[in-house]
Amino acid sequence: MKFVCSKKKLVQAIQTVSKATASNPQTPILGGICMTAENDTIVLEATDNEIGIRCTIEADVSDNGSIVLMGRTAQDVFRRLPGEDVILDYSLEEKLVHIKSGPSNYTLLAMDASAFPHIIRIEPQEAVSFTVTNKDLDDLIRRTVPACGTDIRRPVFTGCLLDLNSGSVTMAATDTHRLSIKTLMISEGPERPRKVIIPAKALKEIQHLLASDVPTDIRVSCSPNKITFEMEGIFITNRLIEGQFPDYKRVMPQNLPINVTLNTADFLSAVERVSLVTRQSEYNIIRLSFSGDKVRITAKNPEIGEAKEQVDANVEGGELDIAFNAAFVTDALQAITGKEFLFQLDKPLSTSIIRETEDTSFLYMITPVRTR
């Protein structure tokens, strides 16, 4: 195996796939990055048997072949090479990889690529697919993942539900105390509906890879136990979470009588300031008092002190005193993109809704906290 390629492109590809290497691998091969040279391309792969990432770059290949290098070593060595190009030559007899770049020469041990669990595509007959832009997919993830739970004893709540229909894609997440729902309309949806639960950890990794201002189409495909994301030069696969996600449509409260319109930035800033005195407490509670044209925000901590804020509001439907976990409120407000939002409420212990005033595709339900 021998090839010459751009150092910059190779380093970028290694950094991309290394997100899928196992940090504490059960076998050494899962901590490695597989490189396959063929037809003037280099295919790099890494997997921990849950998430897998494949990246393809151009290269001048003189001898086809495959090797596996330890992921951390590959990152550190290639990133620090001084030249603009990299020459990699693998000696099958020696089981050694010779790397040259500018004045630098390295010789690294390689593992047998035949033992590497290569990333495979979903069989066409199992796939349900749709295409989405990187911006829209990032929006779906950003608005829902913060509401996922972290208790691994309840795995269904540690991921996001992806609800696919012919004309829409809905993503929902809940930790049982809050529920975030975002719907995206699509022109070419799957022919048959499908619901799958994607691990939040995988979605966060995908979100990092989507961080680009350049519009890119992403092909998403689902099978009963796997989901894949494919964009130019990058292919990602991940195992799905097994289980039954709650019916998010049935739990949404209807006809909430109190409707409060607030400035998003002003209210978020006030909540963040007030929560400074309570964020280290177990429940991080803030109290909201809606009346007239104001909302009063208060928090107390016997070990720190007390904070009070007041924000202008348009309150319709009555007055209410209610308490929430401050972190849940700020997560909701950070997902709001509009200048104003609507807070819909009923009773001190009834579920409330936060939604955009102009965008009906996003909804955030939040359960209040019982206080003395």
Image (cartoon, grey):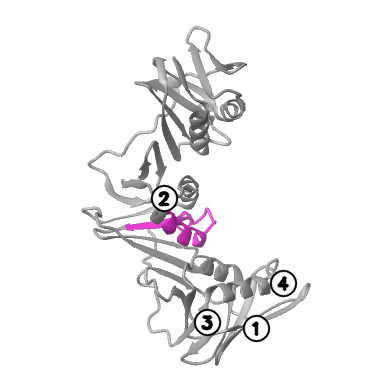
Residue tagged by mark 4?
A: 277
Q: Is residue 229 above or below residue 110?
A: below
Give the class, few, some or many, for how many residues have Cα within 10 Å of label 1's Cα (few <14, many ≥20). few
Q: Which residues are magenta?
A: 138-163
Question: Mark 4 or 1 closer to N-term?
Answer: 4
Residue at (47, 10) in percent of width and height:
92
Residue tagged 3: 349
Callout 2, which amino acid? Answer: Ile
First along the sequence among labels 4 and 2 = 2
Kindly identify the residue that appears in the image at 52 percent across and 26 percent down. 7
Q: Secondary structure at mark 2?
A: loop
Report whether residue 352 is seen.
no
| Mark 4 or mark 3: whose residue is earlier in sequence | 4
**In x, y percent, where is residue 33?**
50, 28
Q: Residues under labels 4 and 2: Cα distance? A: 37 Å
Decide: is 61 above or below 331.
above
Query: Badge 3, how many Cα within 10 Å: few under 14, some, many 20+?
Result: some
Residue identifier under label 1:
372
Residue 245 included in the magenta stretch of the image: no
**Which of pointers 4 and 2 indicates the residue nearer the eye?**
4
Q: Is residue 189 left or right of residue 358?
A: left
**Is 149 part of what is drawn in magenta?**
yes
Q: Can you give x and y, in whole percent of width and height, for residue 29 in the image?
A: 51, 26
Query: Quick one: 115 or 330, which is closer to the camera?
Result: 330
Q: Amino acid at mark 3?
A: Leu
Estimate the spatial distance between the alpha carbons at disc 4 and disc 3, rounded to whole Å: 23 Å
> Most extreme residue toward the top, as rendered?
93
| Image location of residue 54, percent across then percent down | 42, 34
Please report whichever mark, 3 or 1, sits nearer to the chain's N-terminal start: 3
Q: CA distance from mark 3 to mark 2?
A: 32 Å
Secondary structure of the residue carrying tag 4 is: helix
